[in-house]
Image (cartoon, rainbow, N blue to C red):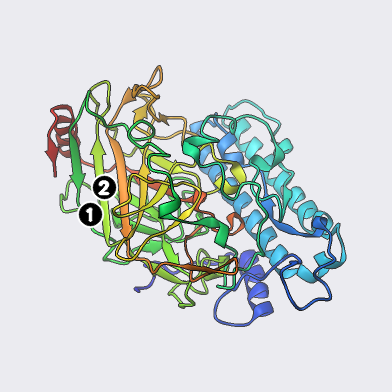
Amino acid sequence: MGRNTRKRRTPLATKVIAGAAALAIGGGGLVWANFYASAHEKNGGQNATKSGQAQVATINCPDVGQKLTKVPRKARWGVARELARLDRQITEAYSRLAETRQAQAGDANYVDNAILGPLKDKRRATLDRIGINIKRAGGQERDLGRFARCQGVPAEQPGGGDGGQNDGGQDGGGQNDGGQNDGGQGNEQPPADNGNGAAGPFAEDFIDINDVQPNSRDLQNGLAANGDTGSTGSFTTECGVNENNLFNSDNIIVAPGVDNGAHHTHDYVGNQSNTAFASDDDLNNAQTTCQNQGDKSTYYWPVLRLQDGTQEFDANDLGGGAEGNVGRILKAQQAEMKFVGNRTTDVVAMPKFIRIITGDAKAFTNGLANANTSFSCTGFEDRQVTDKYVICPEGSQVVRTSNFQSCWDGQNIDSANHRDHVAFVQPDGSCPQGFQAIPQLQVRLVYDVPAPTIENGQIKNPYAVDGFPEQLHKPITDHNDFINVMDEDLMNQVVQCINSGQDCE
């Protein structure tokens, strides 16, 4: 596997914490330790008698970025940097959980006093700076301090959504979408270290594809916009499978100008200048892996890894092994990018540089409102599951599917929370009032993945998407990102093909 195209600059505070955790367990990259007492362990002493209060699985903080729906444009860059600081603070606090297992076992109040209390203080100061940024740019003053408090999620009560903060933005639909309400949200959580050097996934995060009900998540009548009426054509762009080994842990949409803003490693196809520091001009002047050179769009997603002990190029880097993303990076065997139409109307051209995120990298703690990517197997693609990784039979490959929002507000290429400027189609296929239909991007990724096995409740050689460390590599955190950098002629061709019912490449 090729190395990262840009050397990671490691912030000192995170370097110290990651280094301390690595020293605690030895060399070879950071292996995330079991950070609460487990009744399943056999070395006795500190384990079987510990109270549930000491068994903290992860940290659940309000996702402030999703709540900031009104941020003046002049303040967005500064706010994005402070939001990235909040993410770093959570990552560092989670590292403290990994380092202090013995202290937690001896003191039921340790997590509150030594981890969550200091985290709240740091978050409050950062939230104050966000408020100052917004106010200086002419925005409305808000009481952001109420989002400072985080919760420790007990081992037996993972997830739960939005850090116990019921203030706006996380109460939309989709919490029980497509029958995916039986996996991981409320079941007992296994020990944090799955035995493969990472905090998750666990046996409960996997399902045999034969046990998934067909059409339990109906893509044709749900998130997918295409159908037999309206604009029925399609346009497929061929951009390869990251043969150039372009990887980094930036996120130019959510954290522009912030090194390691994603805290996990991304695969990139299409645009070859996608870093956190790229301007729109940089993207426009970049090289592209797409066969049609008029498509310089950037398509990126978290890498899929096989947790088999492989020391990857990023084994000791932030975004990689230093934040619990370990194992062999699996490249997609196929990466299909298709744009389709709308079931009720023609589509209009996407504006250049529009940014769209689908799925939610923090869905384990945010709740399922924005979780919509799915897993399946070749030959079984009428069976789609959002909250499980799939175990495919011999000869079948793992499929990741992402259907993007395909309704646009007609004005903005981005929004403060990176979601409000676009929307999914409604159940009848139409766009919400005030939105117009644009081509829907559908991404289908196919992987050769050795089938994991489950023995005595333990998963052997699991695979997982990269993610924020506190999200425990849950499948519901899968997501996909897109910036449109097609030239005008190509976008017009896309629209013409779709509206005329042609299937173009």
Name the quadrant containing residue 341: top left
Left or right side of 218 for 309: right
Name the quadrant containing residue 169: top right
State how far apart marks 2 and 1 are (Cα).
8 Å
Which quarter of the rendering shows the N terminus?
bottom left
Q: Amino acid at mark 1?
A: Cys
Provide the secondary structure element on which disc 1 rests. Answer: loop
Residue 378 lies, in percent from the top left, at: 30, 55
| Image: 151 above or below 172 | below
Badge 1 crowding class, 10 Å Cα cut-off, few under 14, some 14 to 19, many 20 or more, is: many
Residue 195 lies, in percent from the top left, at: 59, 73
Residue 122 lies, in percent from the top left, at: 73, 51
Query: Which residue: 70% across, 49% down?
Result: 157
Query: Which residue: 35% across, 28% down?
Result: 407
Q: Are marks 2 and 1 in contact (CB under 8 Å)?
A: yes
Q: Amino acid at mark 2?
A: Met
Residue denoted by label 1: 239
Residue 183 lies, in percent from the top left, at: 56, 48
* Residue 17 seen in this snapshot: yes
- Mark 2 or mark 1, whichever is nearer to me: 2
Sequence-wise first label, 2 or 1: 1
Provide the secondary structure element on which disc 2 rests. Answer: strand
| Image: 480 above or below 31 | above
Among all residues in the image, which is located at the extreme top?
433
Left or right side of 405 for 32: right
Residue denoted by label 2: 337
Name the quadrant containing residue 268: bottom left
